[in-house]
Image: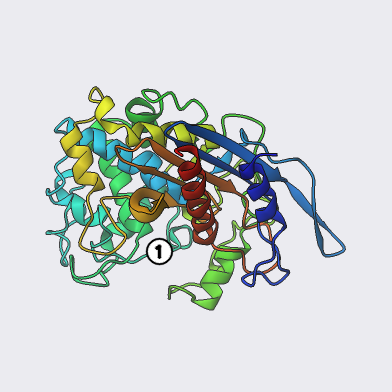
Amino acid sequence: MTSLESAARQLVSRTSPASKDGQFPAGLALGILGPGFSAAASAGHRTVHWREGQRQGIDPMTVDTHHDMASVTKVLGTTACLLRLVSDGLVDLDAEVRRYLPGFRGAGRDSITVRDLLLHRGGLKEWYPLYAAAKSADEAHRVIETLPLVWAPRTVRRYSDLGFILLGRIVAAAAGQDLASATSELVTKPLGLYSTRYARPAGSNVATGSRDDRIEAAMIDSQIPYAVPFSSSDFSGWRRQPVQGQVADGNAHHVFDGVAGHAGLFSTVPDLLQFAAALAAYREHDSLWRSESAEEFFSAGPDPGQALGFRRYRLVVDGEALTVLGHPGHVGCAVGFVPGRGIALALASNRLLVDGAPVPTEDLWTELLELAGDEIGRSSQ
C-alpha cells in the first residue's frame, strides 16, 4: 500500500469534531503530481445508504469516479475561460461589467469591473435563492442585475456566487455562444479534459453529491449564513432523494439547468490533475493563453488568499514555502497547482453524506497540502 493510499483510507475512517456522528466523507480520491512524482488513490464508497441510523457504503469510490465540482467550476470553467478570452483580447479585466451585460447598471453598479468580480470585490450579495425568486434563467439574471449592492465596490472582499454567475454570462457574451459550449471550446477540449462537462457526468461511475436539498432549505429557514426574504415553503421543487448525476447547488440545478458560472461542472481526479498540470506549466501553452495574462491572474490580489478567480494556499516542500493556486467546492472537491514548479493537486469526496455537520472541504484540502509537501519532498531526495 502506498502512503497516498494509506492517507486516503485514514481520511475516510477518521473522526471529526465537526460531524455529529464523527464521520469524515464516505469516500474520497486524491491525486498528486510533482517533479518525478505521480500518485493517485481512492478509498471508501461513492454511494451510501442509511440503515438503522448508520451509514453503510454501497459502491466503491475509484480514482476515475465522476464528481460534482460545485465551486471548483469557478476556476475549472469560468476563470479558465476568462484567462483565454483576456489573452485573446476579447475581454478586458478593467472594463465595466455593463460593457458585456448592458442590464447591469445603475444604483452603484456602473463602475464594477470584471476584475472586481474575479476578486469578489464587486459589492454583490454572497448568495441568494434565485429559484425562490424567479421562474426562469432570464428572470434570475434580472434578479441579480437589480438586487441592491450590499457594499461599495472595491471596499471589501465578500465571496459571491452571484458575481461568478455574472462572469459566466460575460464568458458567453464575449465568446458568442452559450457557457457550456464556450467552456468546451476554450478549456476542456484543448486540454483533453474528456470527463469534464456541465450539468451531468460523462460516465456512470458517479459519486452521490448530497442526501437531498435539505442543506439549502435549512439555510433559508435559519437565515444562516445569509439573510434572505424567503422561507423554504416559498419553493416547491425541493429534491427529497439523494442527488446523484445532478448538480447539488440549488441555483445551478433548479434555475440554470446545471450550467452556470459558479457551479455545474462534473469532473474526475485525472482531469483535475491534467487541468492543474497545464496551468502549472502555463509557459508551455502559449497557443492557449499569453504568459503575461496567466501571471496577472496568478498574482496576489488586495485581499489575503485571493488572486483573480483563484484562491491562494501555502505548500511547504523541503522547507520552502510555495504558493498553490486553486479552489475548493462545497460538495467536497478541490484543485490546485504551483505555477512553474510542475506541481498539481486534486481532491474529490462526497463529504455531504453525513448526518451532522460535514467536515469542511478546506480541512480535507489542508490534509492533502500537508501530505503533498511530504510526498514531493521525499521524491526529490
- 285 relative to 294, above or below: above
| Label 1 secondary element | loop
Q: Give the residue drawn at x 72%, y 57%.
A: 13
How many numbered marks does the figure carry?
1
In the rendering, at what x and y percent does residue 50 appear?
Answer: 81, 57
Say whether residue 29 is left or right of residue 259.
right
Say whether residue 83 is left or right of residue 266.
left
Of residues 336 and 76, the one drawn nearer to the viewer in this rendering: 336
Residue 31 seen in the figure: yes
Q: Give the residue drawn at x 48%, y 62%.
A: 132
Say whether residue 231 is left or right of residue 337.
right
Of residues 281 and 302, the one drawn nearer to the viewer in this rendering: 281
In the rendering, at what x and y percent does residue 301 appear?
Answer: 22, 57
Residue 258 seen in the figure: no
Quarter residue 336 falls in: top left
Q: Give the residue drawn at x 18%, y 38%.
A: 293
| Mark 1, residue position | 127
In the rendering, at what x and y percent does residue 41 appear?
Answer: 63, 39
In the rendering, at what x and y percent does residue 80 appear?
Answer: 32, 38
Quarter residue 153 falls in: bottom left
Amino acid at circle 1:
Trp
